[in-house]
Image: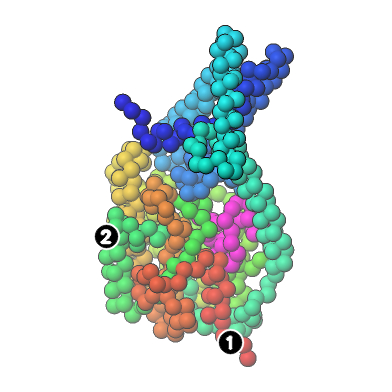
Amino acid sequence: MPASPTAFATLWPLPLELAAILLITLALPAALFAVWRVLVLGAALLLVLLKLADLGTYSAFNRPFNPLLDTHLPRDGWNILSQSLGTGLAALAVAAALLAVLVLLIVTGYGMAQLRRWPARARWTLAAACVVLVAATGVRALPGTGPLPAVADARTSSAIVDRAERIIASAADLAAFRRQLGESDDTHSSGGGESRLKRLAGKNVLLVFVESYGRTVFERPLYADVIGPRLAAFERDIRSAGFSARSGWLTSPTFGGQSWLAHGTLLSGLWVDSQPRYDALVKSRRVSLNRRFAQAGWRASAVMPAITRDWPEADWFGYDRIFASGDLGYAGQPFNWVTMPDQYTLAAIERLILDQPAERPAMIETALISSHAPWTPIPPLLDWADVGDGQVFDDYASAGDPPEVVWQDYDRVRAQYRKAIDYSLETLASFITTQADDDLVLIILGDHQPAPLVTGDNATRGVPIHIIAHDPAVLEAIEAWQWTRGMTPDDNTPVWPMDAFYERFIEAFSAPPG
């Protein structure tokens, strides 16, 4: 059976580096061969590991691996893999990959040794073929030779040079970012003191990051056929309760994961697209949007159901109070990685913050996580009066197939993702129409797109953002933004980088000077 064009495209042109390695292997004296073989095997191991790392980051984040910026990803990758497939299957997959790498290295080392034992005529023939290959490649590169077919190329060397250049550029970019942070303080172009955020005076502000809520749910029919009607119903329901919405597009700094990069970007007004940038941000004097609210008289709180360990980075955000997973009173069973369903999180916000008597309004940041992978199981929306301490969700927490079964079928994974986003939106709409009072302003946005498995190829980093309020003056303050009325931004709605929101929001809701 003839090889497919795809197979030929993978194997041809031949790698020029292979010819060079074969020539050196044949020509070196015995005393140097052992050292050479170790160098070759070391380089091969490094290249294979980088290729595997690229495979992982492209699958999860739709980008190549950067050794300077991504040192934390192997740990995070293991967490995601073990949560999706189960610890046993995840360990088996990792062991199989490592075994394959080991076999490759053994075969390569053995083959190099055997090559030197070939008969002299065979070795000379191979050497001559390598010289011809190198010469043909050199001739093809000369001007005036015409469109000669490509026999070999140095794509491996080019890839290594390209990666090195990206690492150098990343180091320079990180240094520039740190200098920018060093120049940050607590001043802002919109002014300060009494004028800051005054147009939201007396309003409780709820900032909601919806996990993996990306533009793909608007543009890919597999999701849009369900999410489109859901958003239309969302809009009708909140309108009947006296609320209105404006919707726009943001470009997230991350794709498929690392939600905290999006949180840091939106809340700092700086582009935070890597872990080193985030680490530098949370050690800086840059003032977060949460702290801006606190300085202007709000009670700044964080409700984070995914936080189950110490969170030292929280100091930078400037919260007056942090409600982590263990502070929310959830007595039900977890939904795999998801510690509690979104409906419980919103009910806890109402019980612990919004319903509590206070002299100052609340600014609350939360991250809803029911739409976090592995997207199974997903509970139904319950009567809010039945939520209680969360034990009512126990029957749903163990319902259906576990992740290690669902994730064997990519169509089922996509269906579960669609169901998860639909649930989060349904829950938010119900919260607004049945639980919210007229003084609540909501900012709802996606943190990033889901993984490429869900989005398909060529997806952007776009995420939707909605501002919802009962008071018409709130939406009048952002009229100049040209966002779409309602819950579905259209193709003509401006697309902002996520870091642009910080300054524009503060300017829109701060009283004009004077």
Percent position (x, y) of residue 304?
49, 58
| Nearest to the observer: residue 27 or residue 66 | 27
The residue under label 1 is 512
Horizontal side, residue 29 vs residue 494: left or right: right
Which residue is rendered at x = 34% and y = 38% of the image?
Answer: 408
Amino acid bearing label 1? Pro
Which residue is rendered at x = 64% and y = 47% of the image?
Answer: 165
**Image: 106 above or below 458:** above
Residue contact between numbered discs 1 and 2, judged by CB atoms under 8 Å: no
Between label 1 and label 2, give the one nearer the viewer: 2
Q: Secondary structure at mark 2?
A: helix
The residue under label 2 is 225
Horizontal side, residue 185 vs residue 460: left or right: right
**Image: 480 above or below 27:** below
Percent position (x, y) of residue 208?
45, 65
| Nearest to the observer: residue 37 or residue 7 | 7
Label 1 packing within 10 angstroms: few (<14), some (14-19), many (20+)? few
Q: Chief secondary structure of the magenta span?
A: helix
- The span shown in magenta is 259-283
Amino acid bearing label 2? Asp
Which residue is rendered at x = 47% and y = 49% of the image?
Answer: 62
State how far apart marks 1 and 2 are (Cα). Answer: 43 Å
Which residue is rendered at x = 70% and y = 15% of the image?
Answer: 29
Label 2 packing within 10 angstroms: few (<14), some (14-19), many (20+)? some
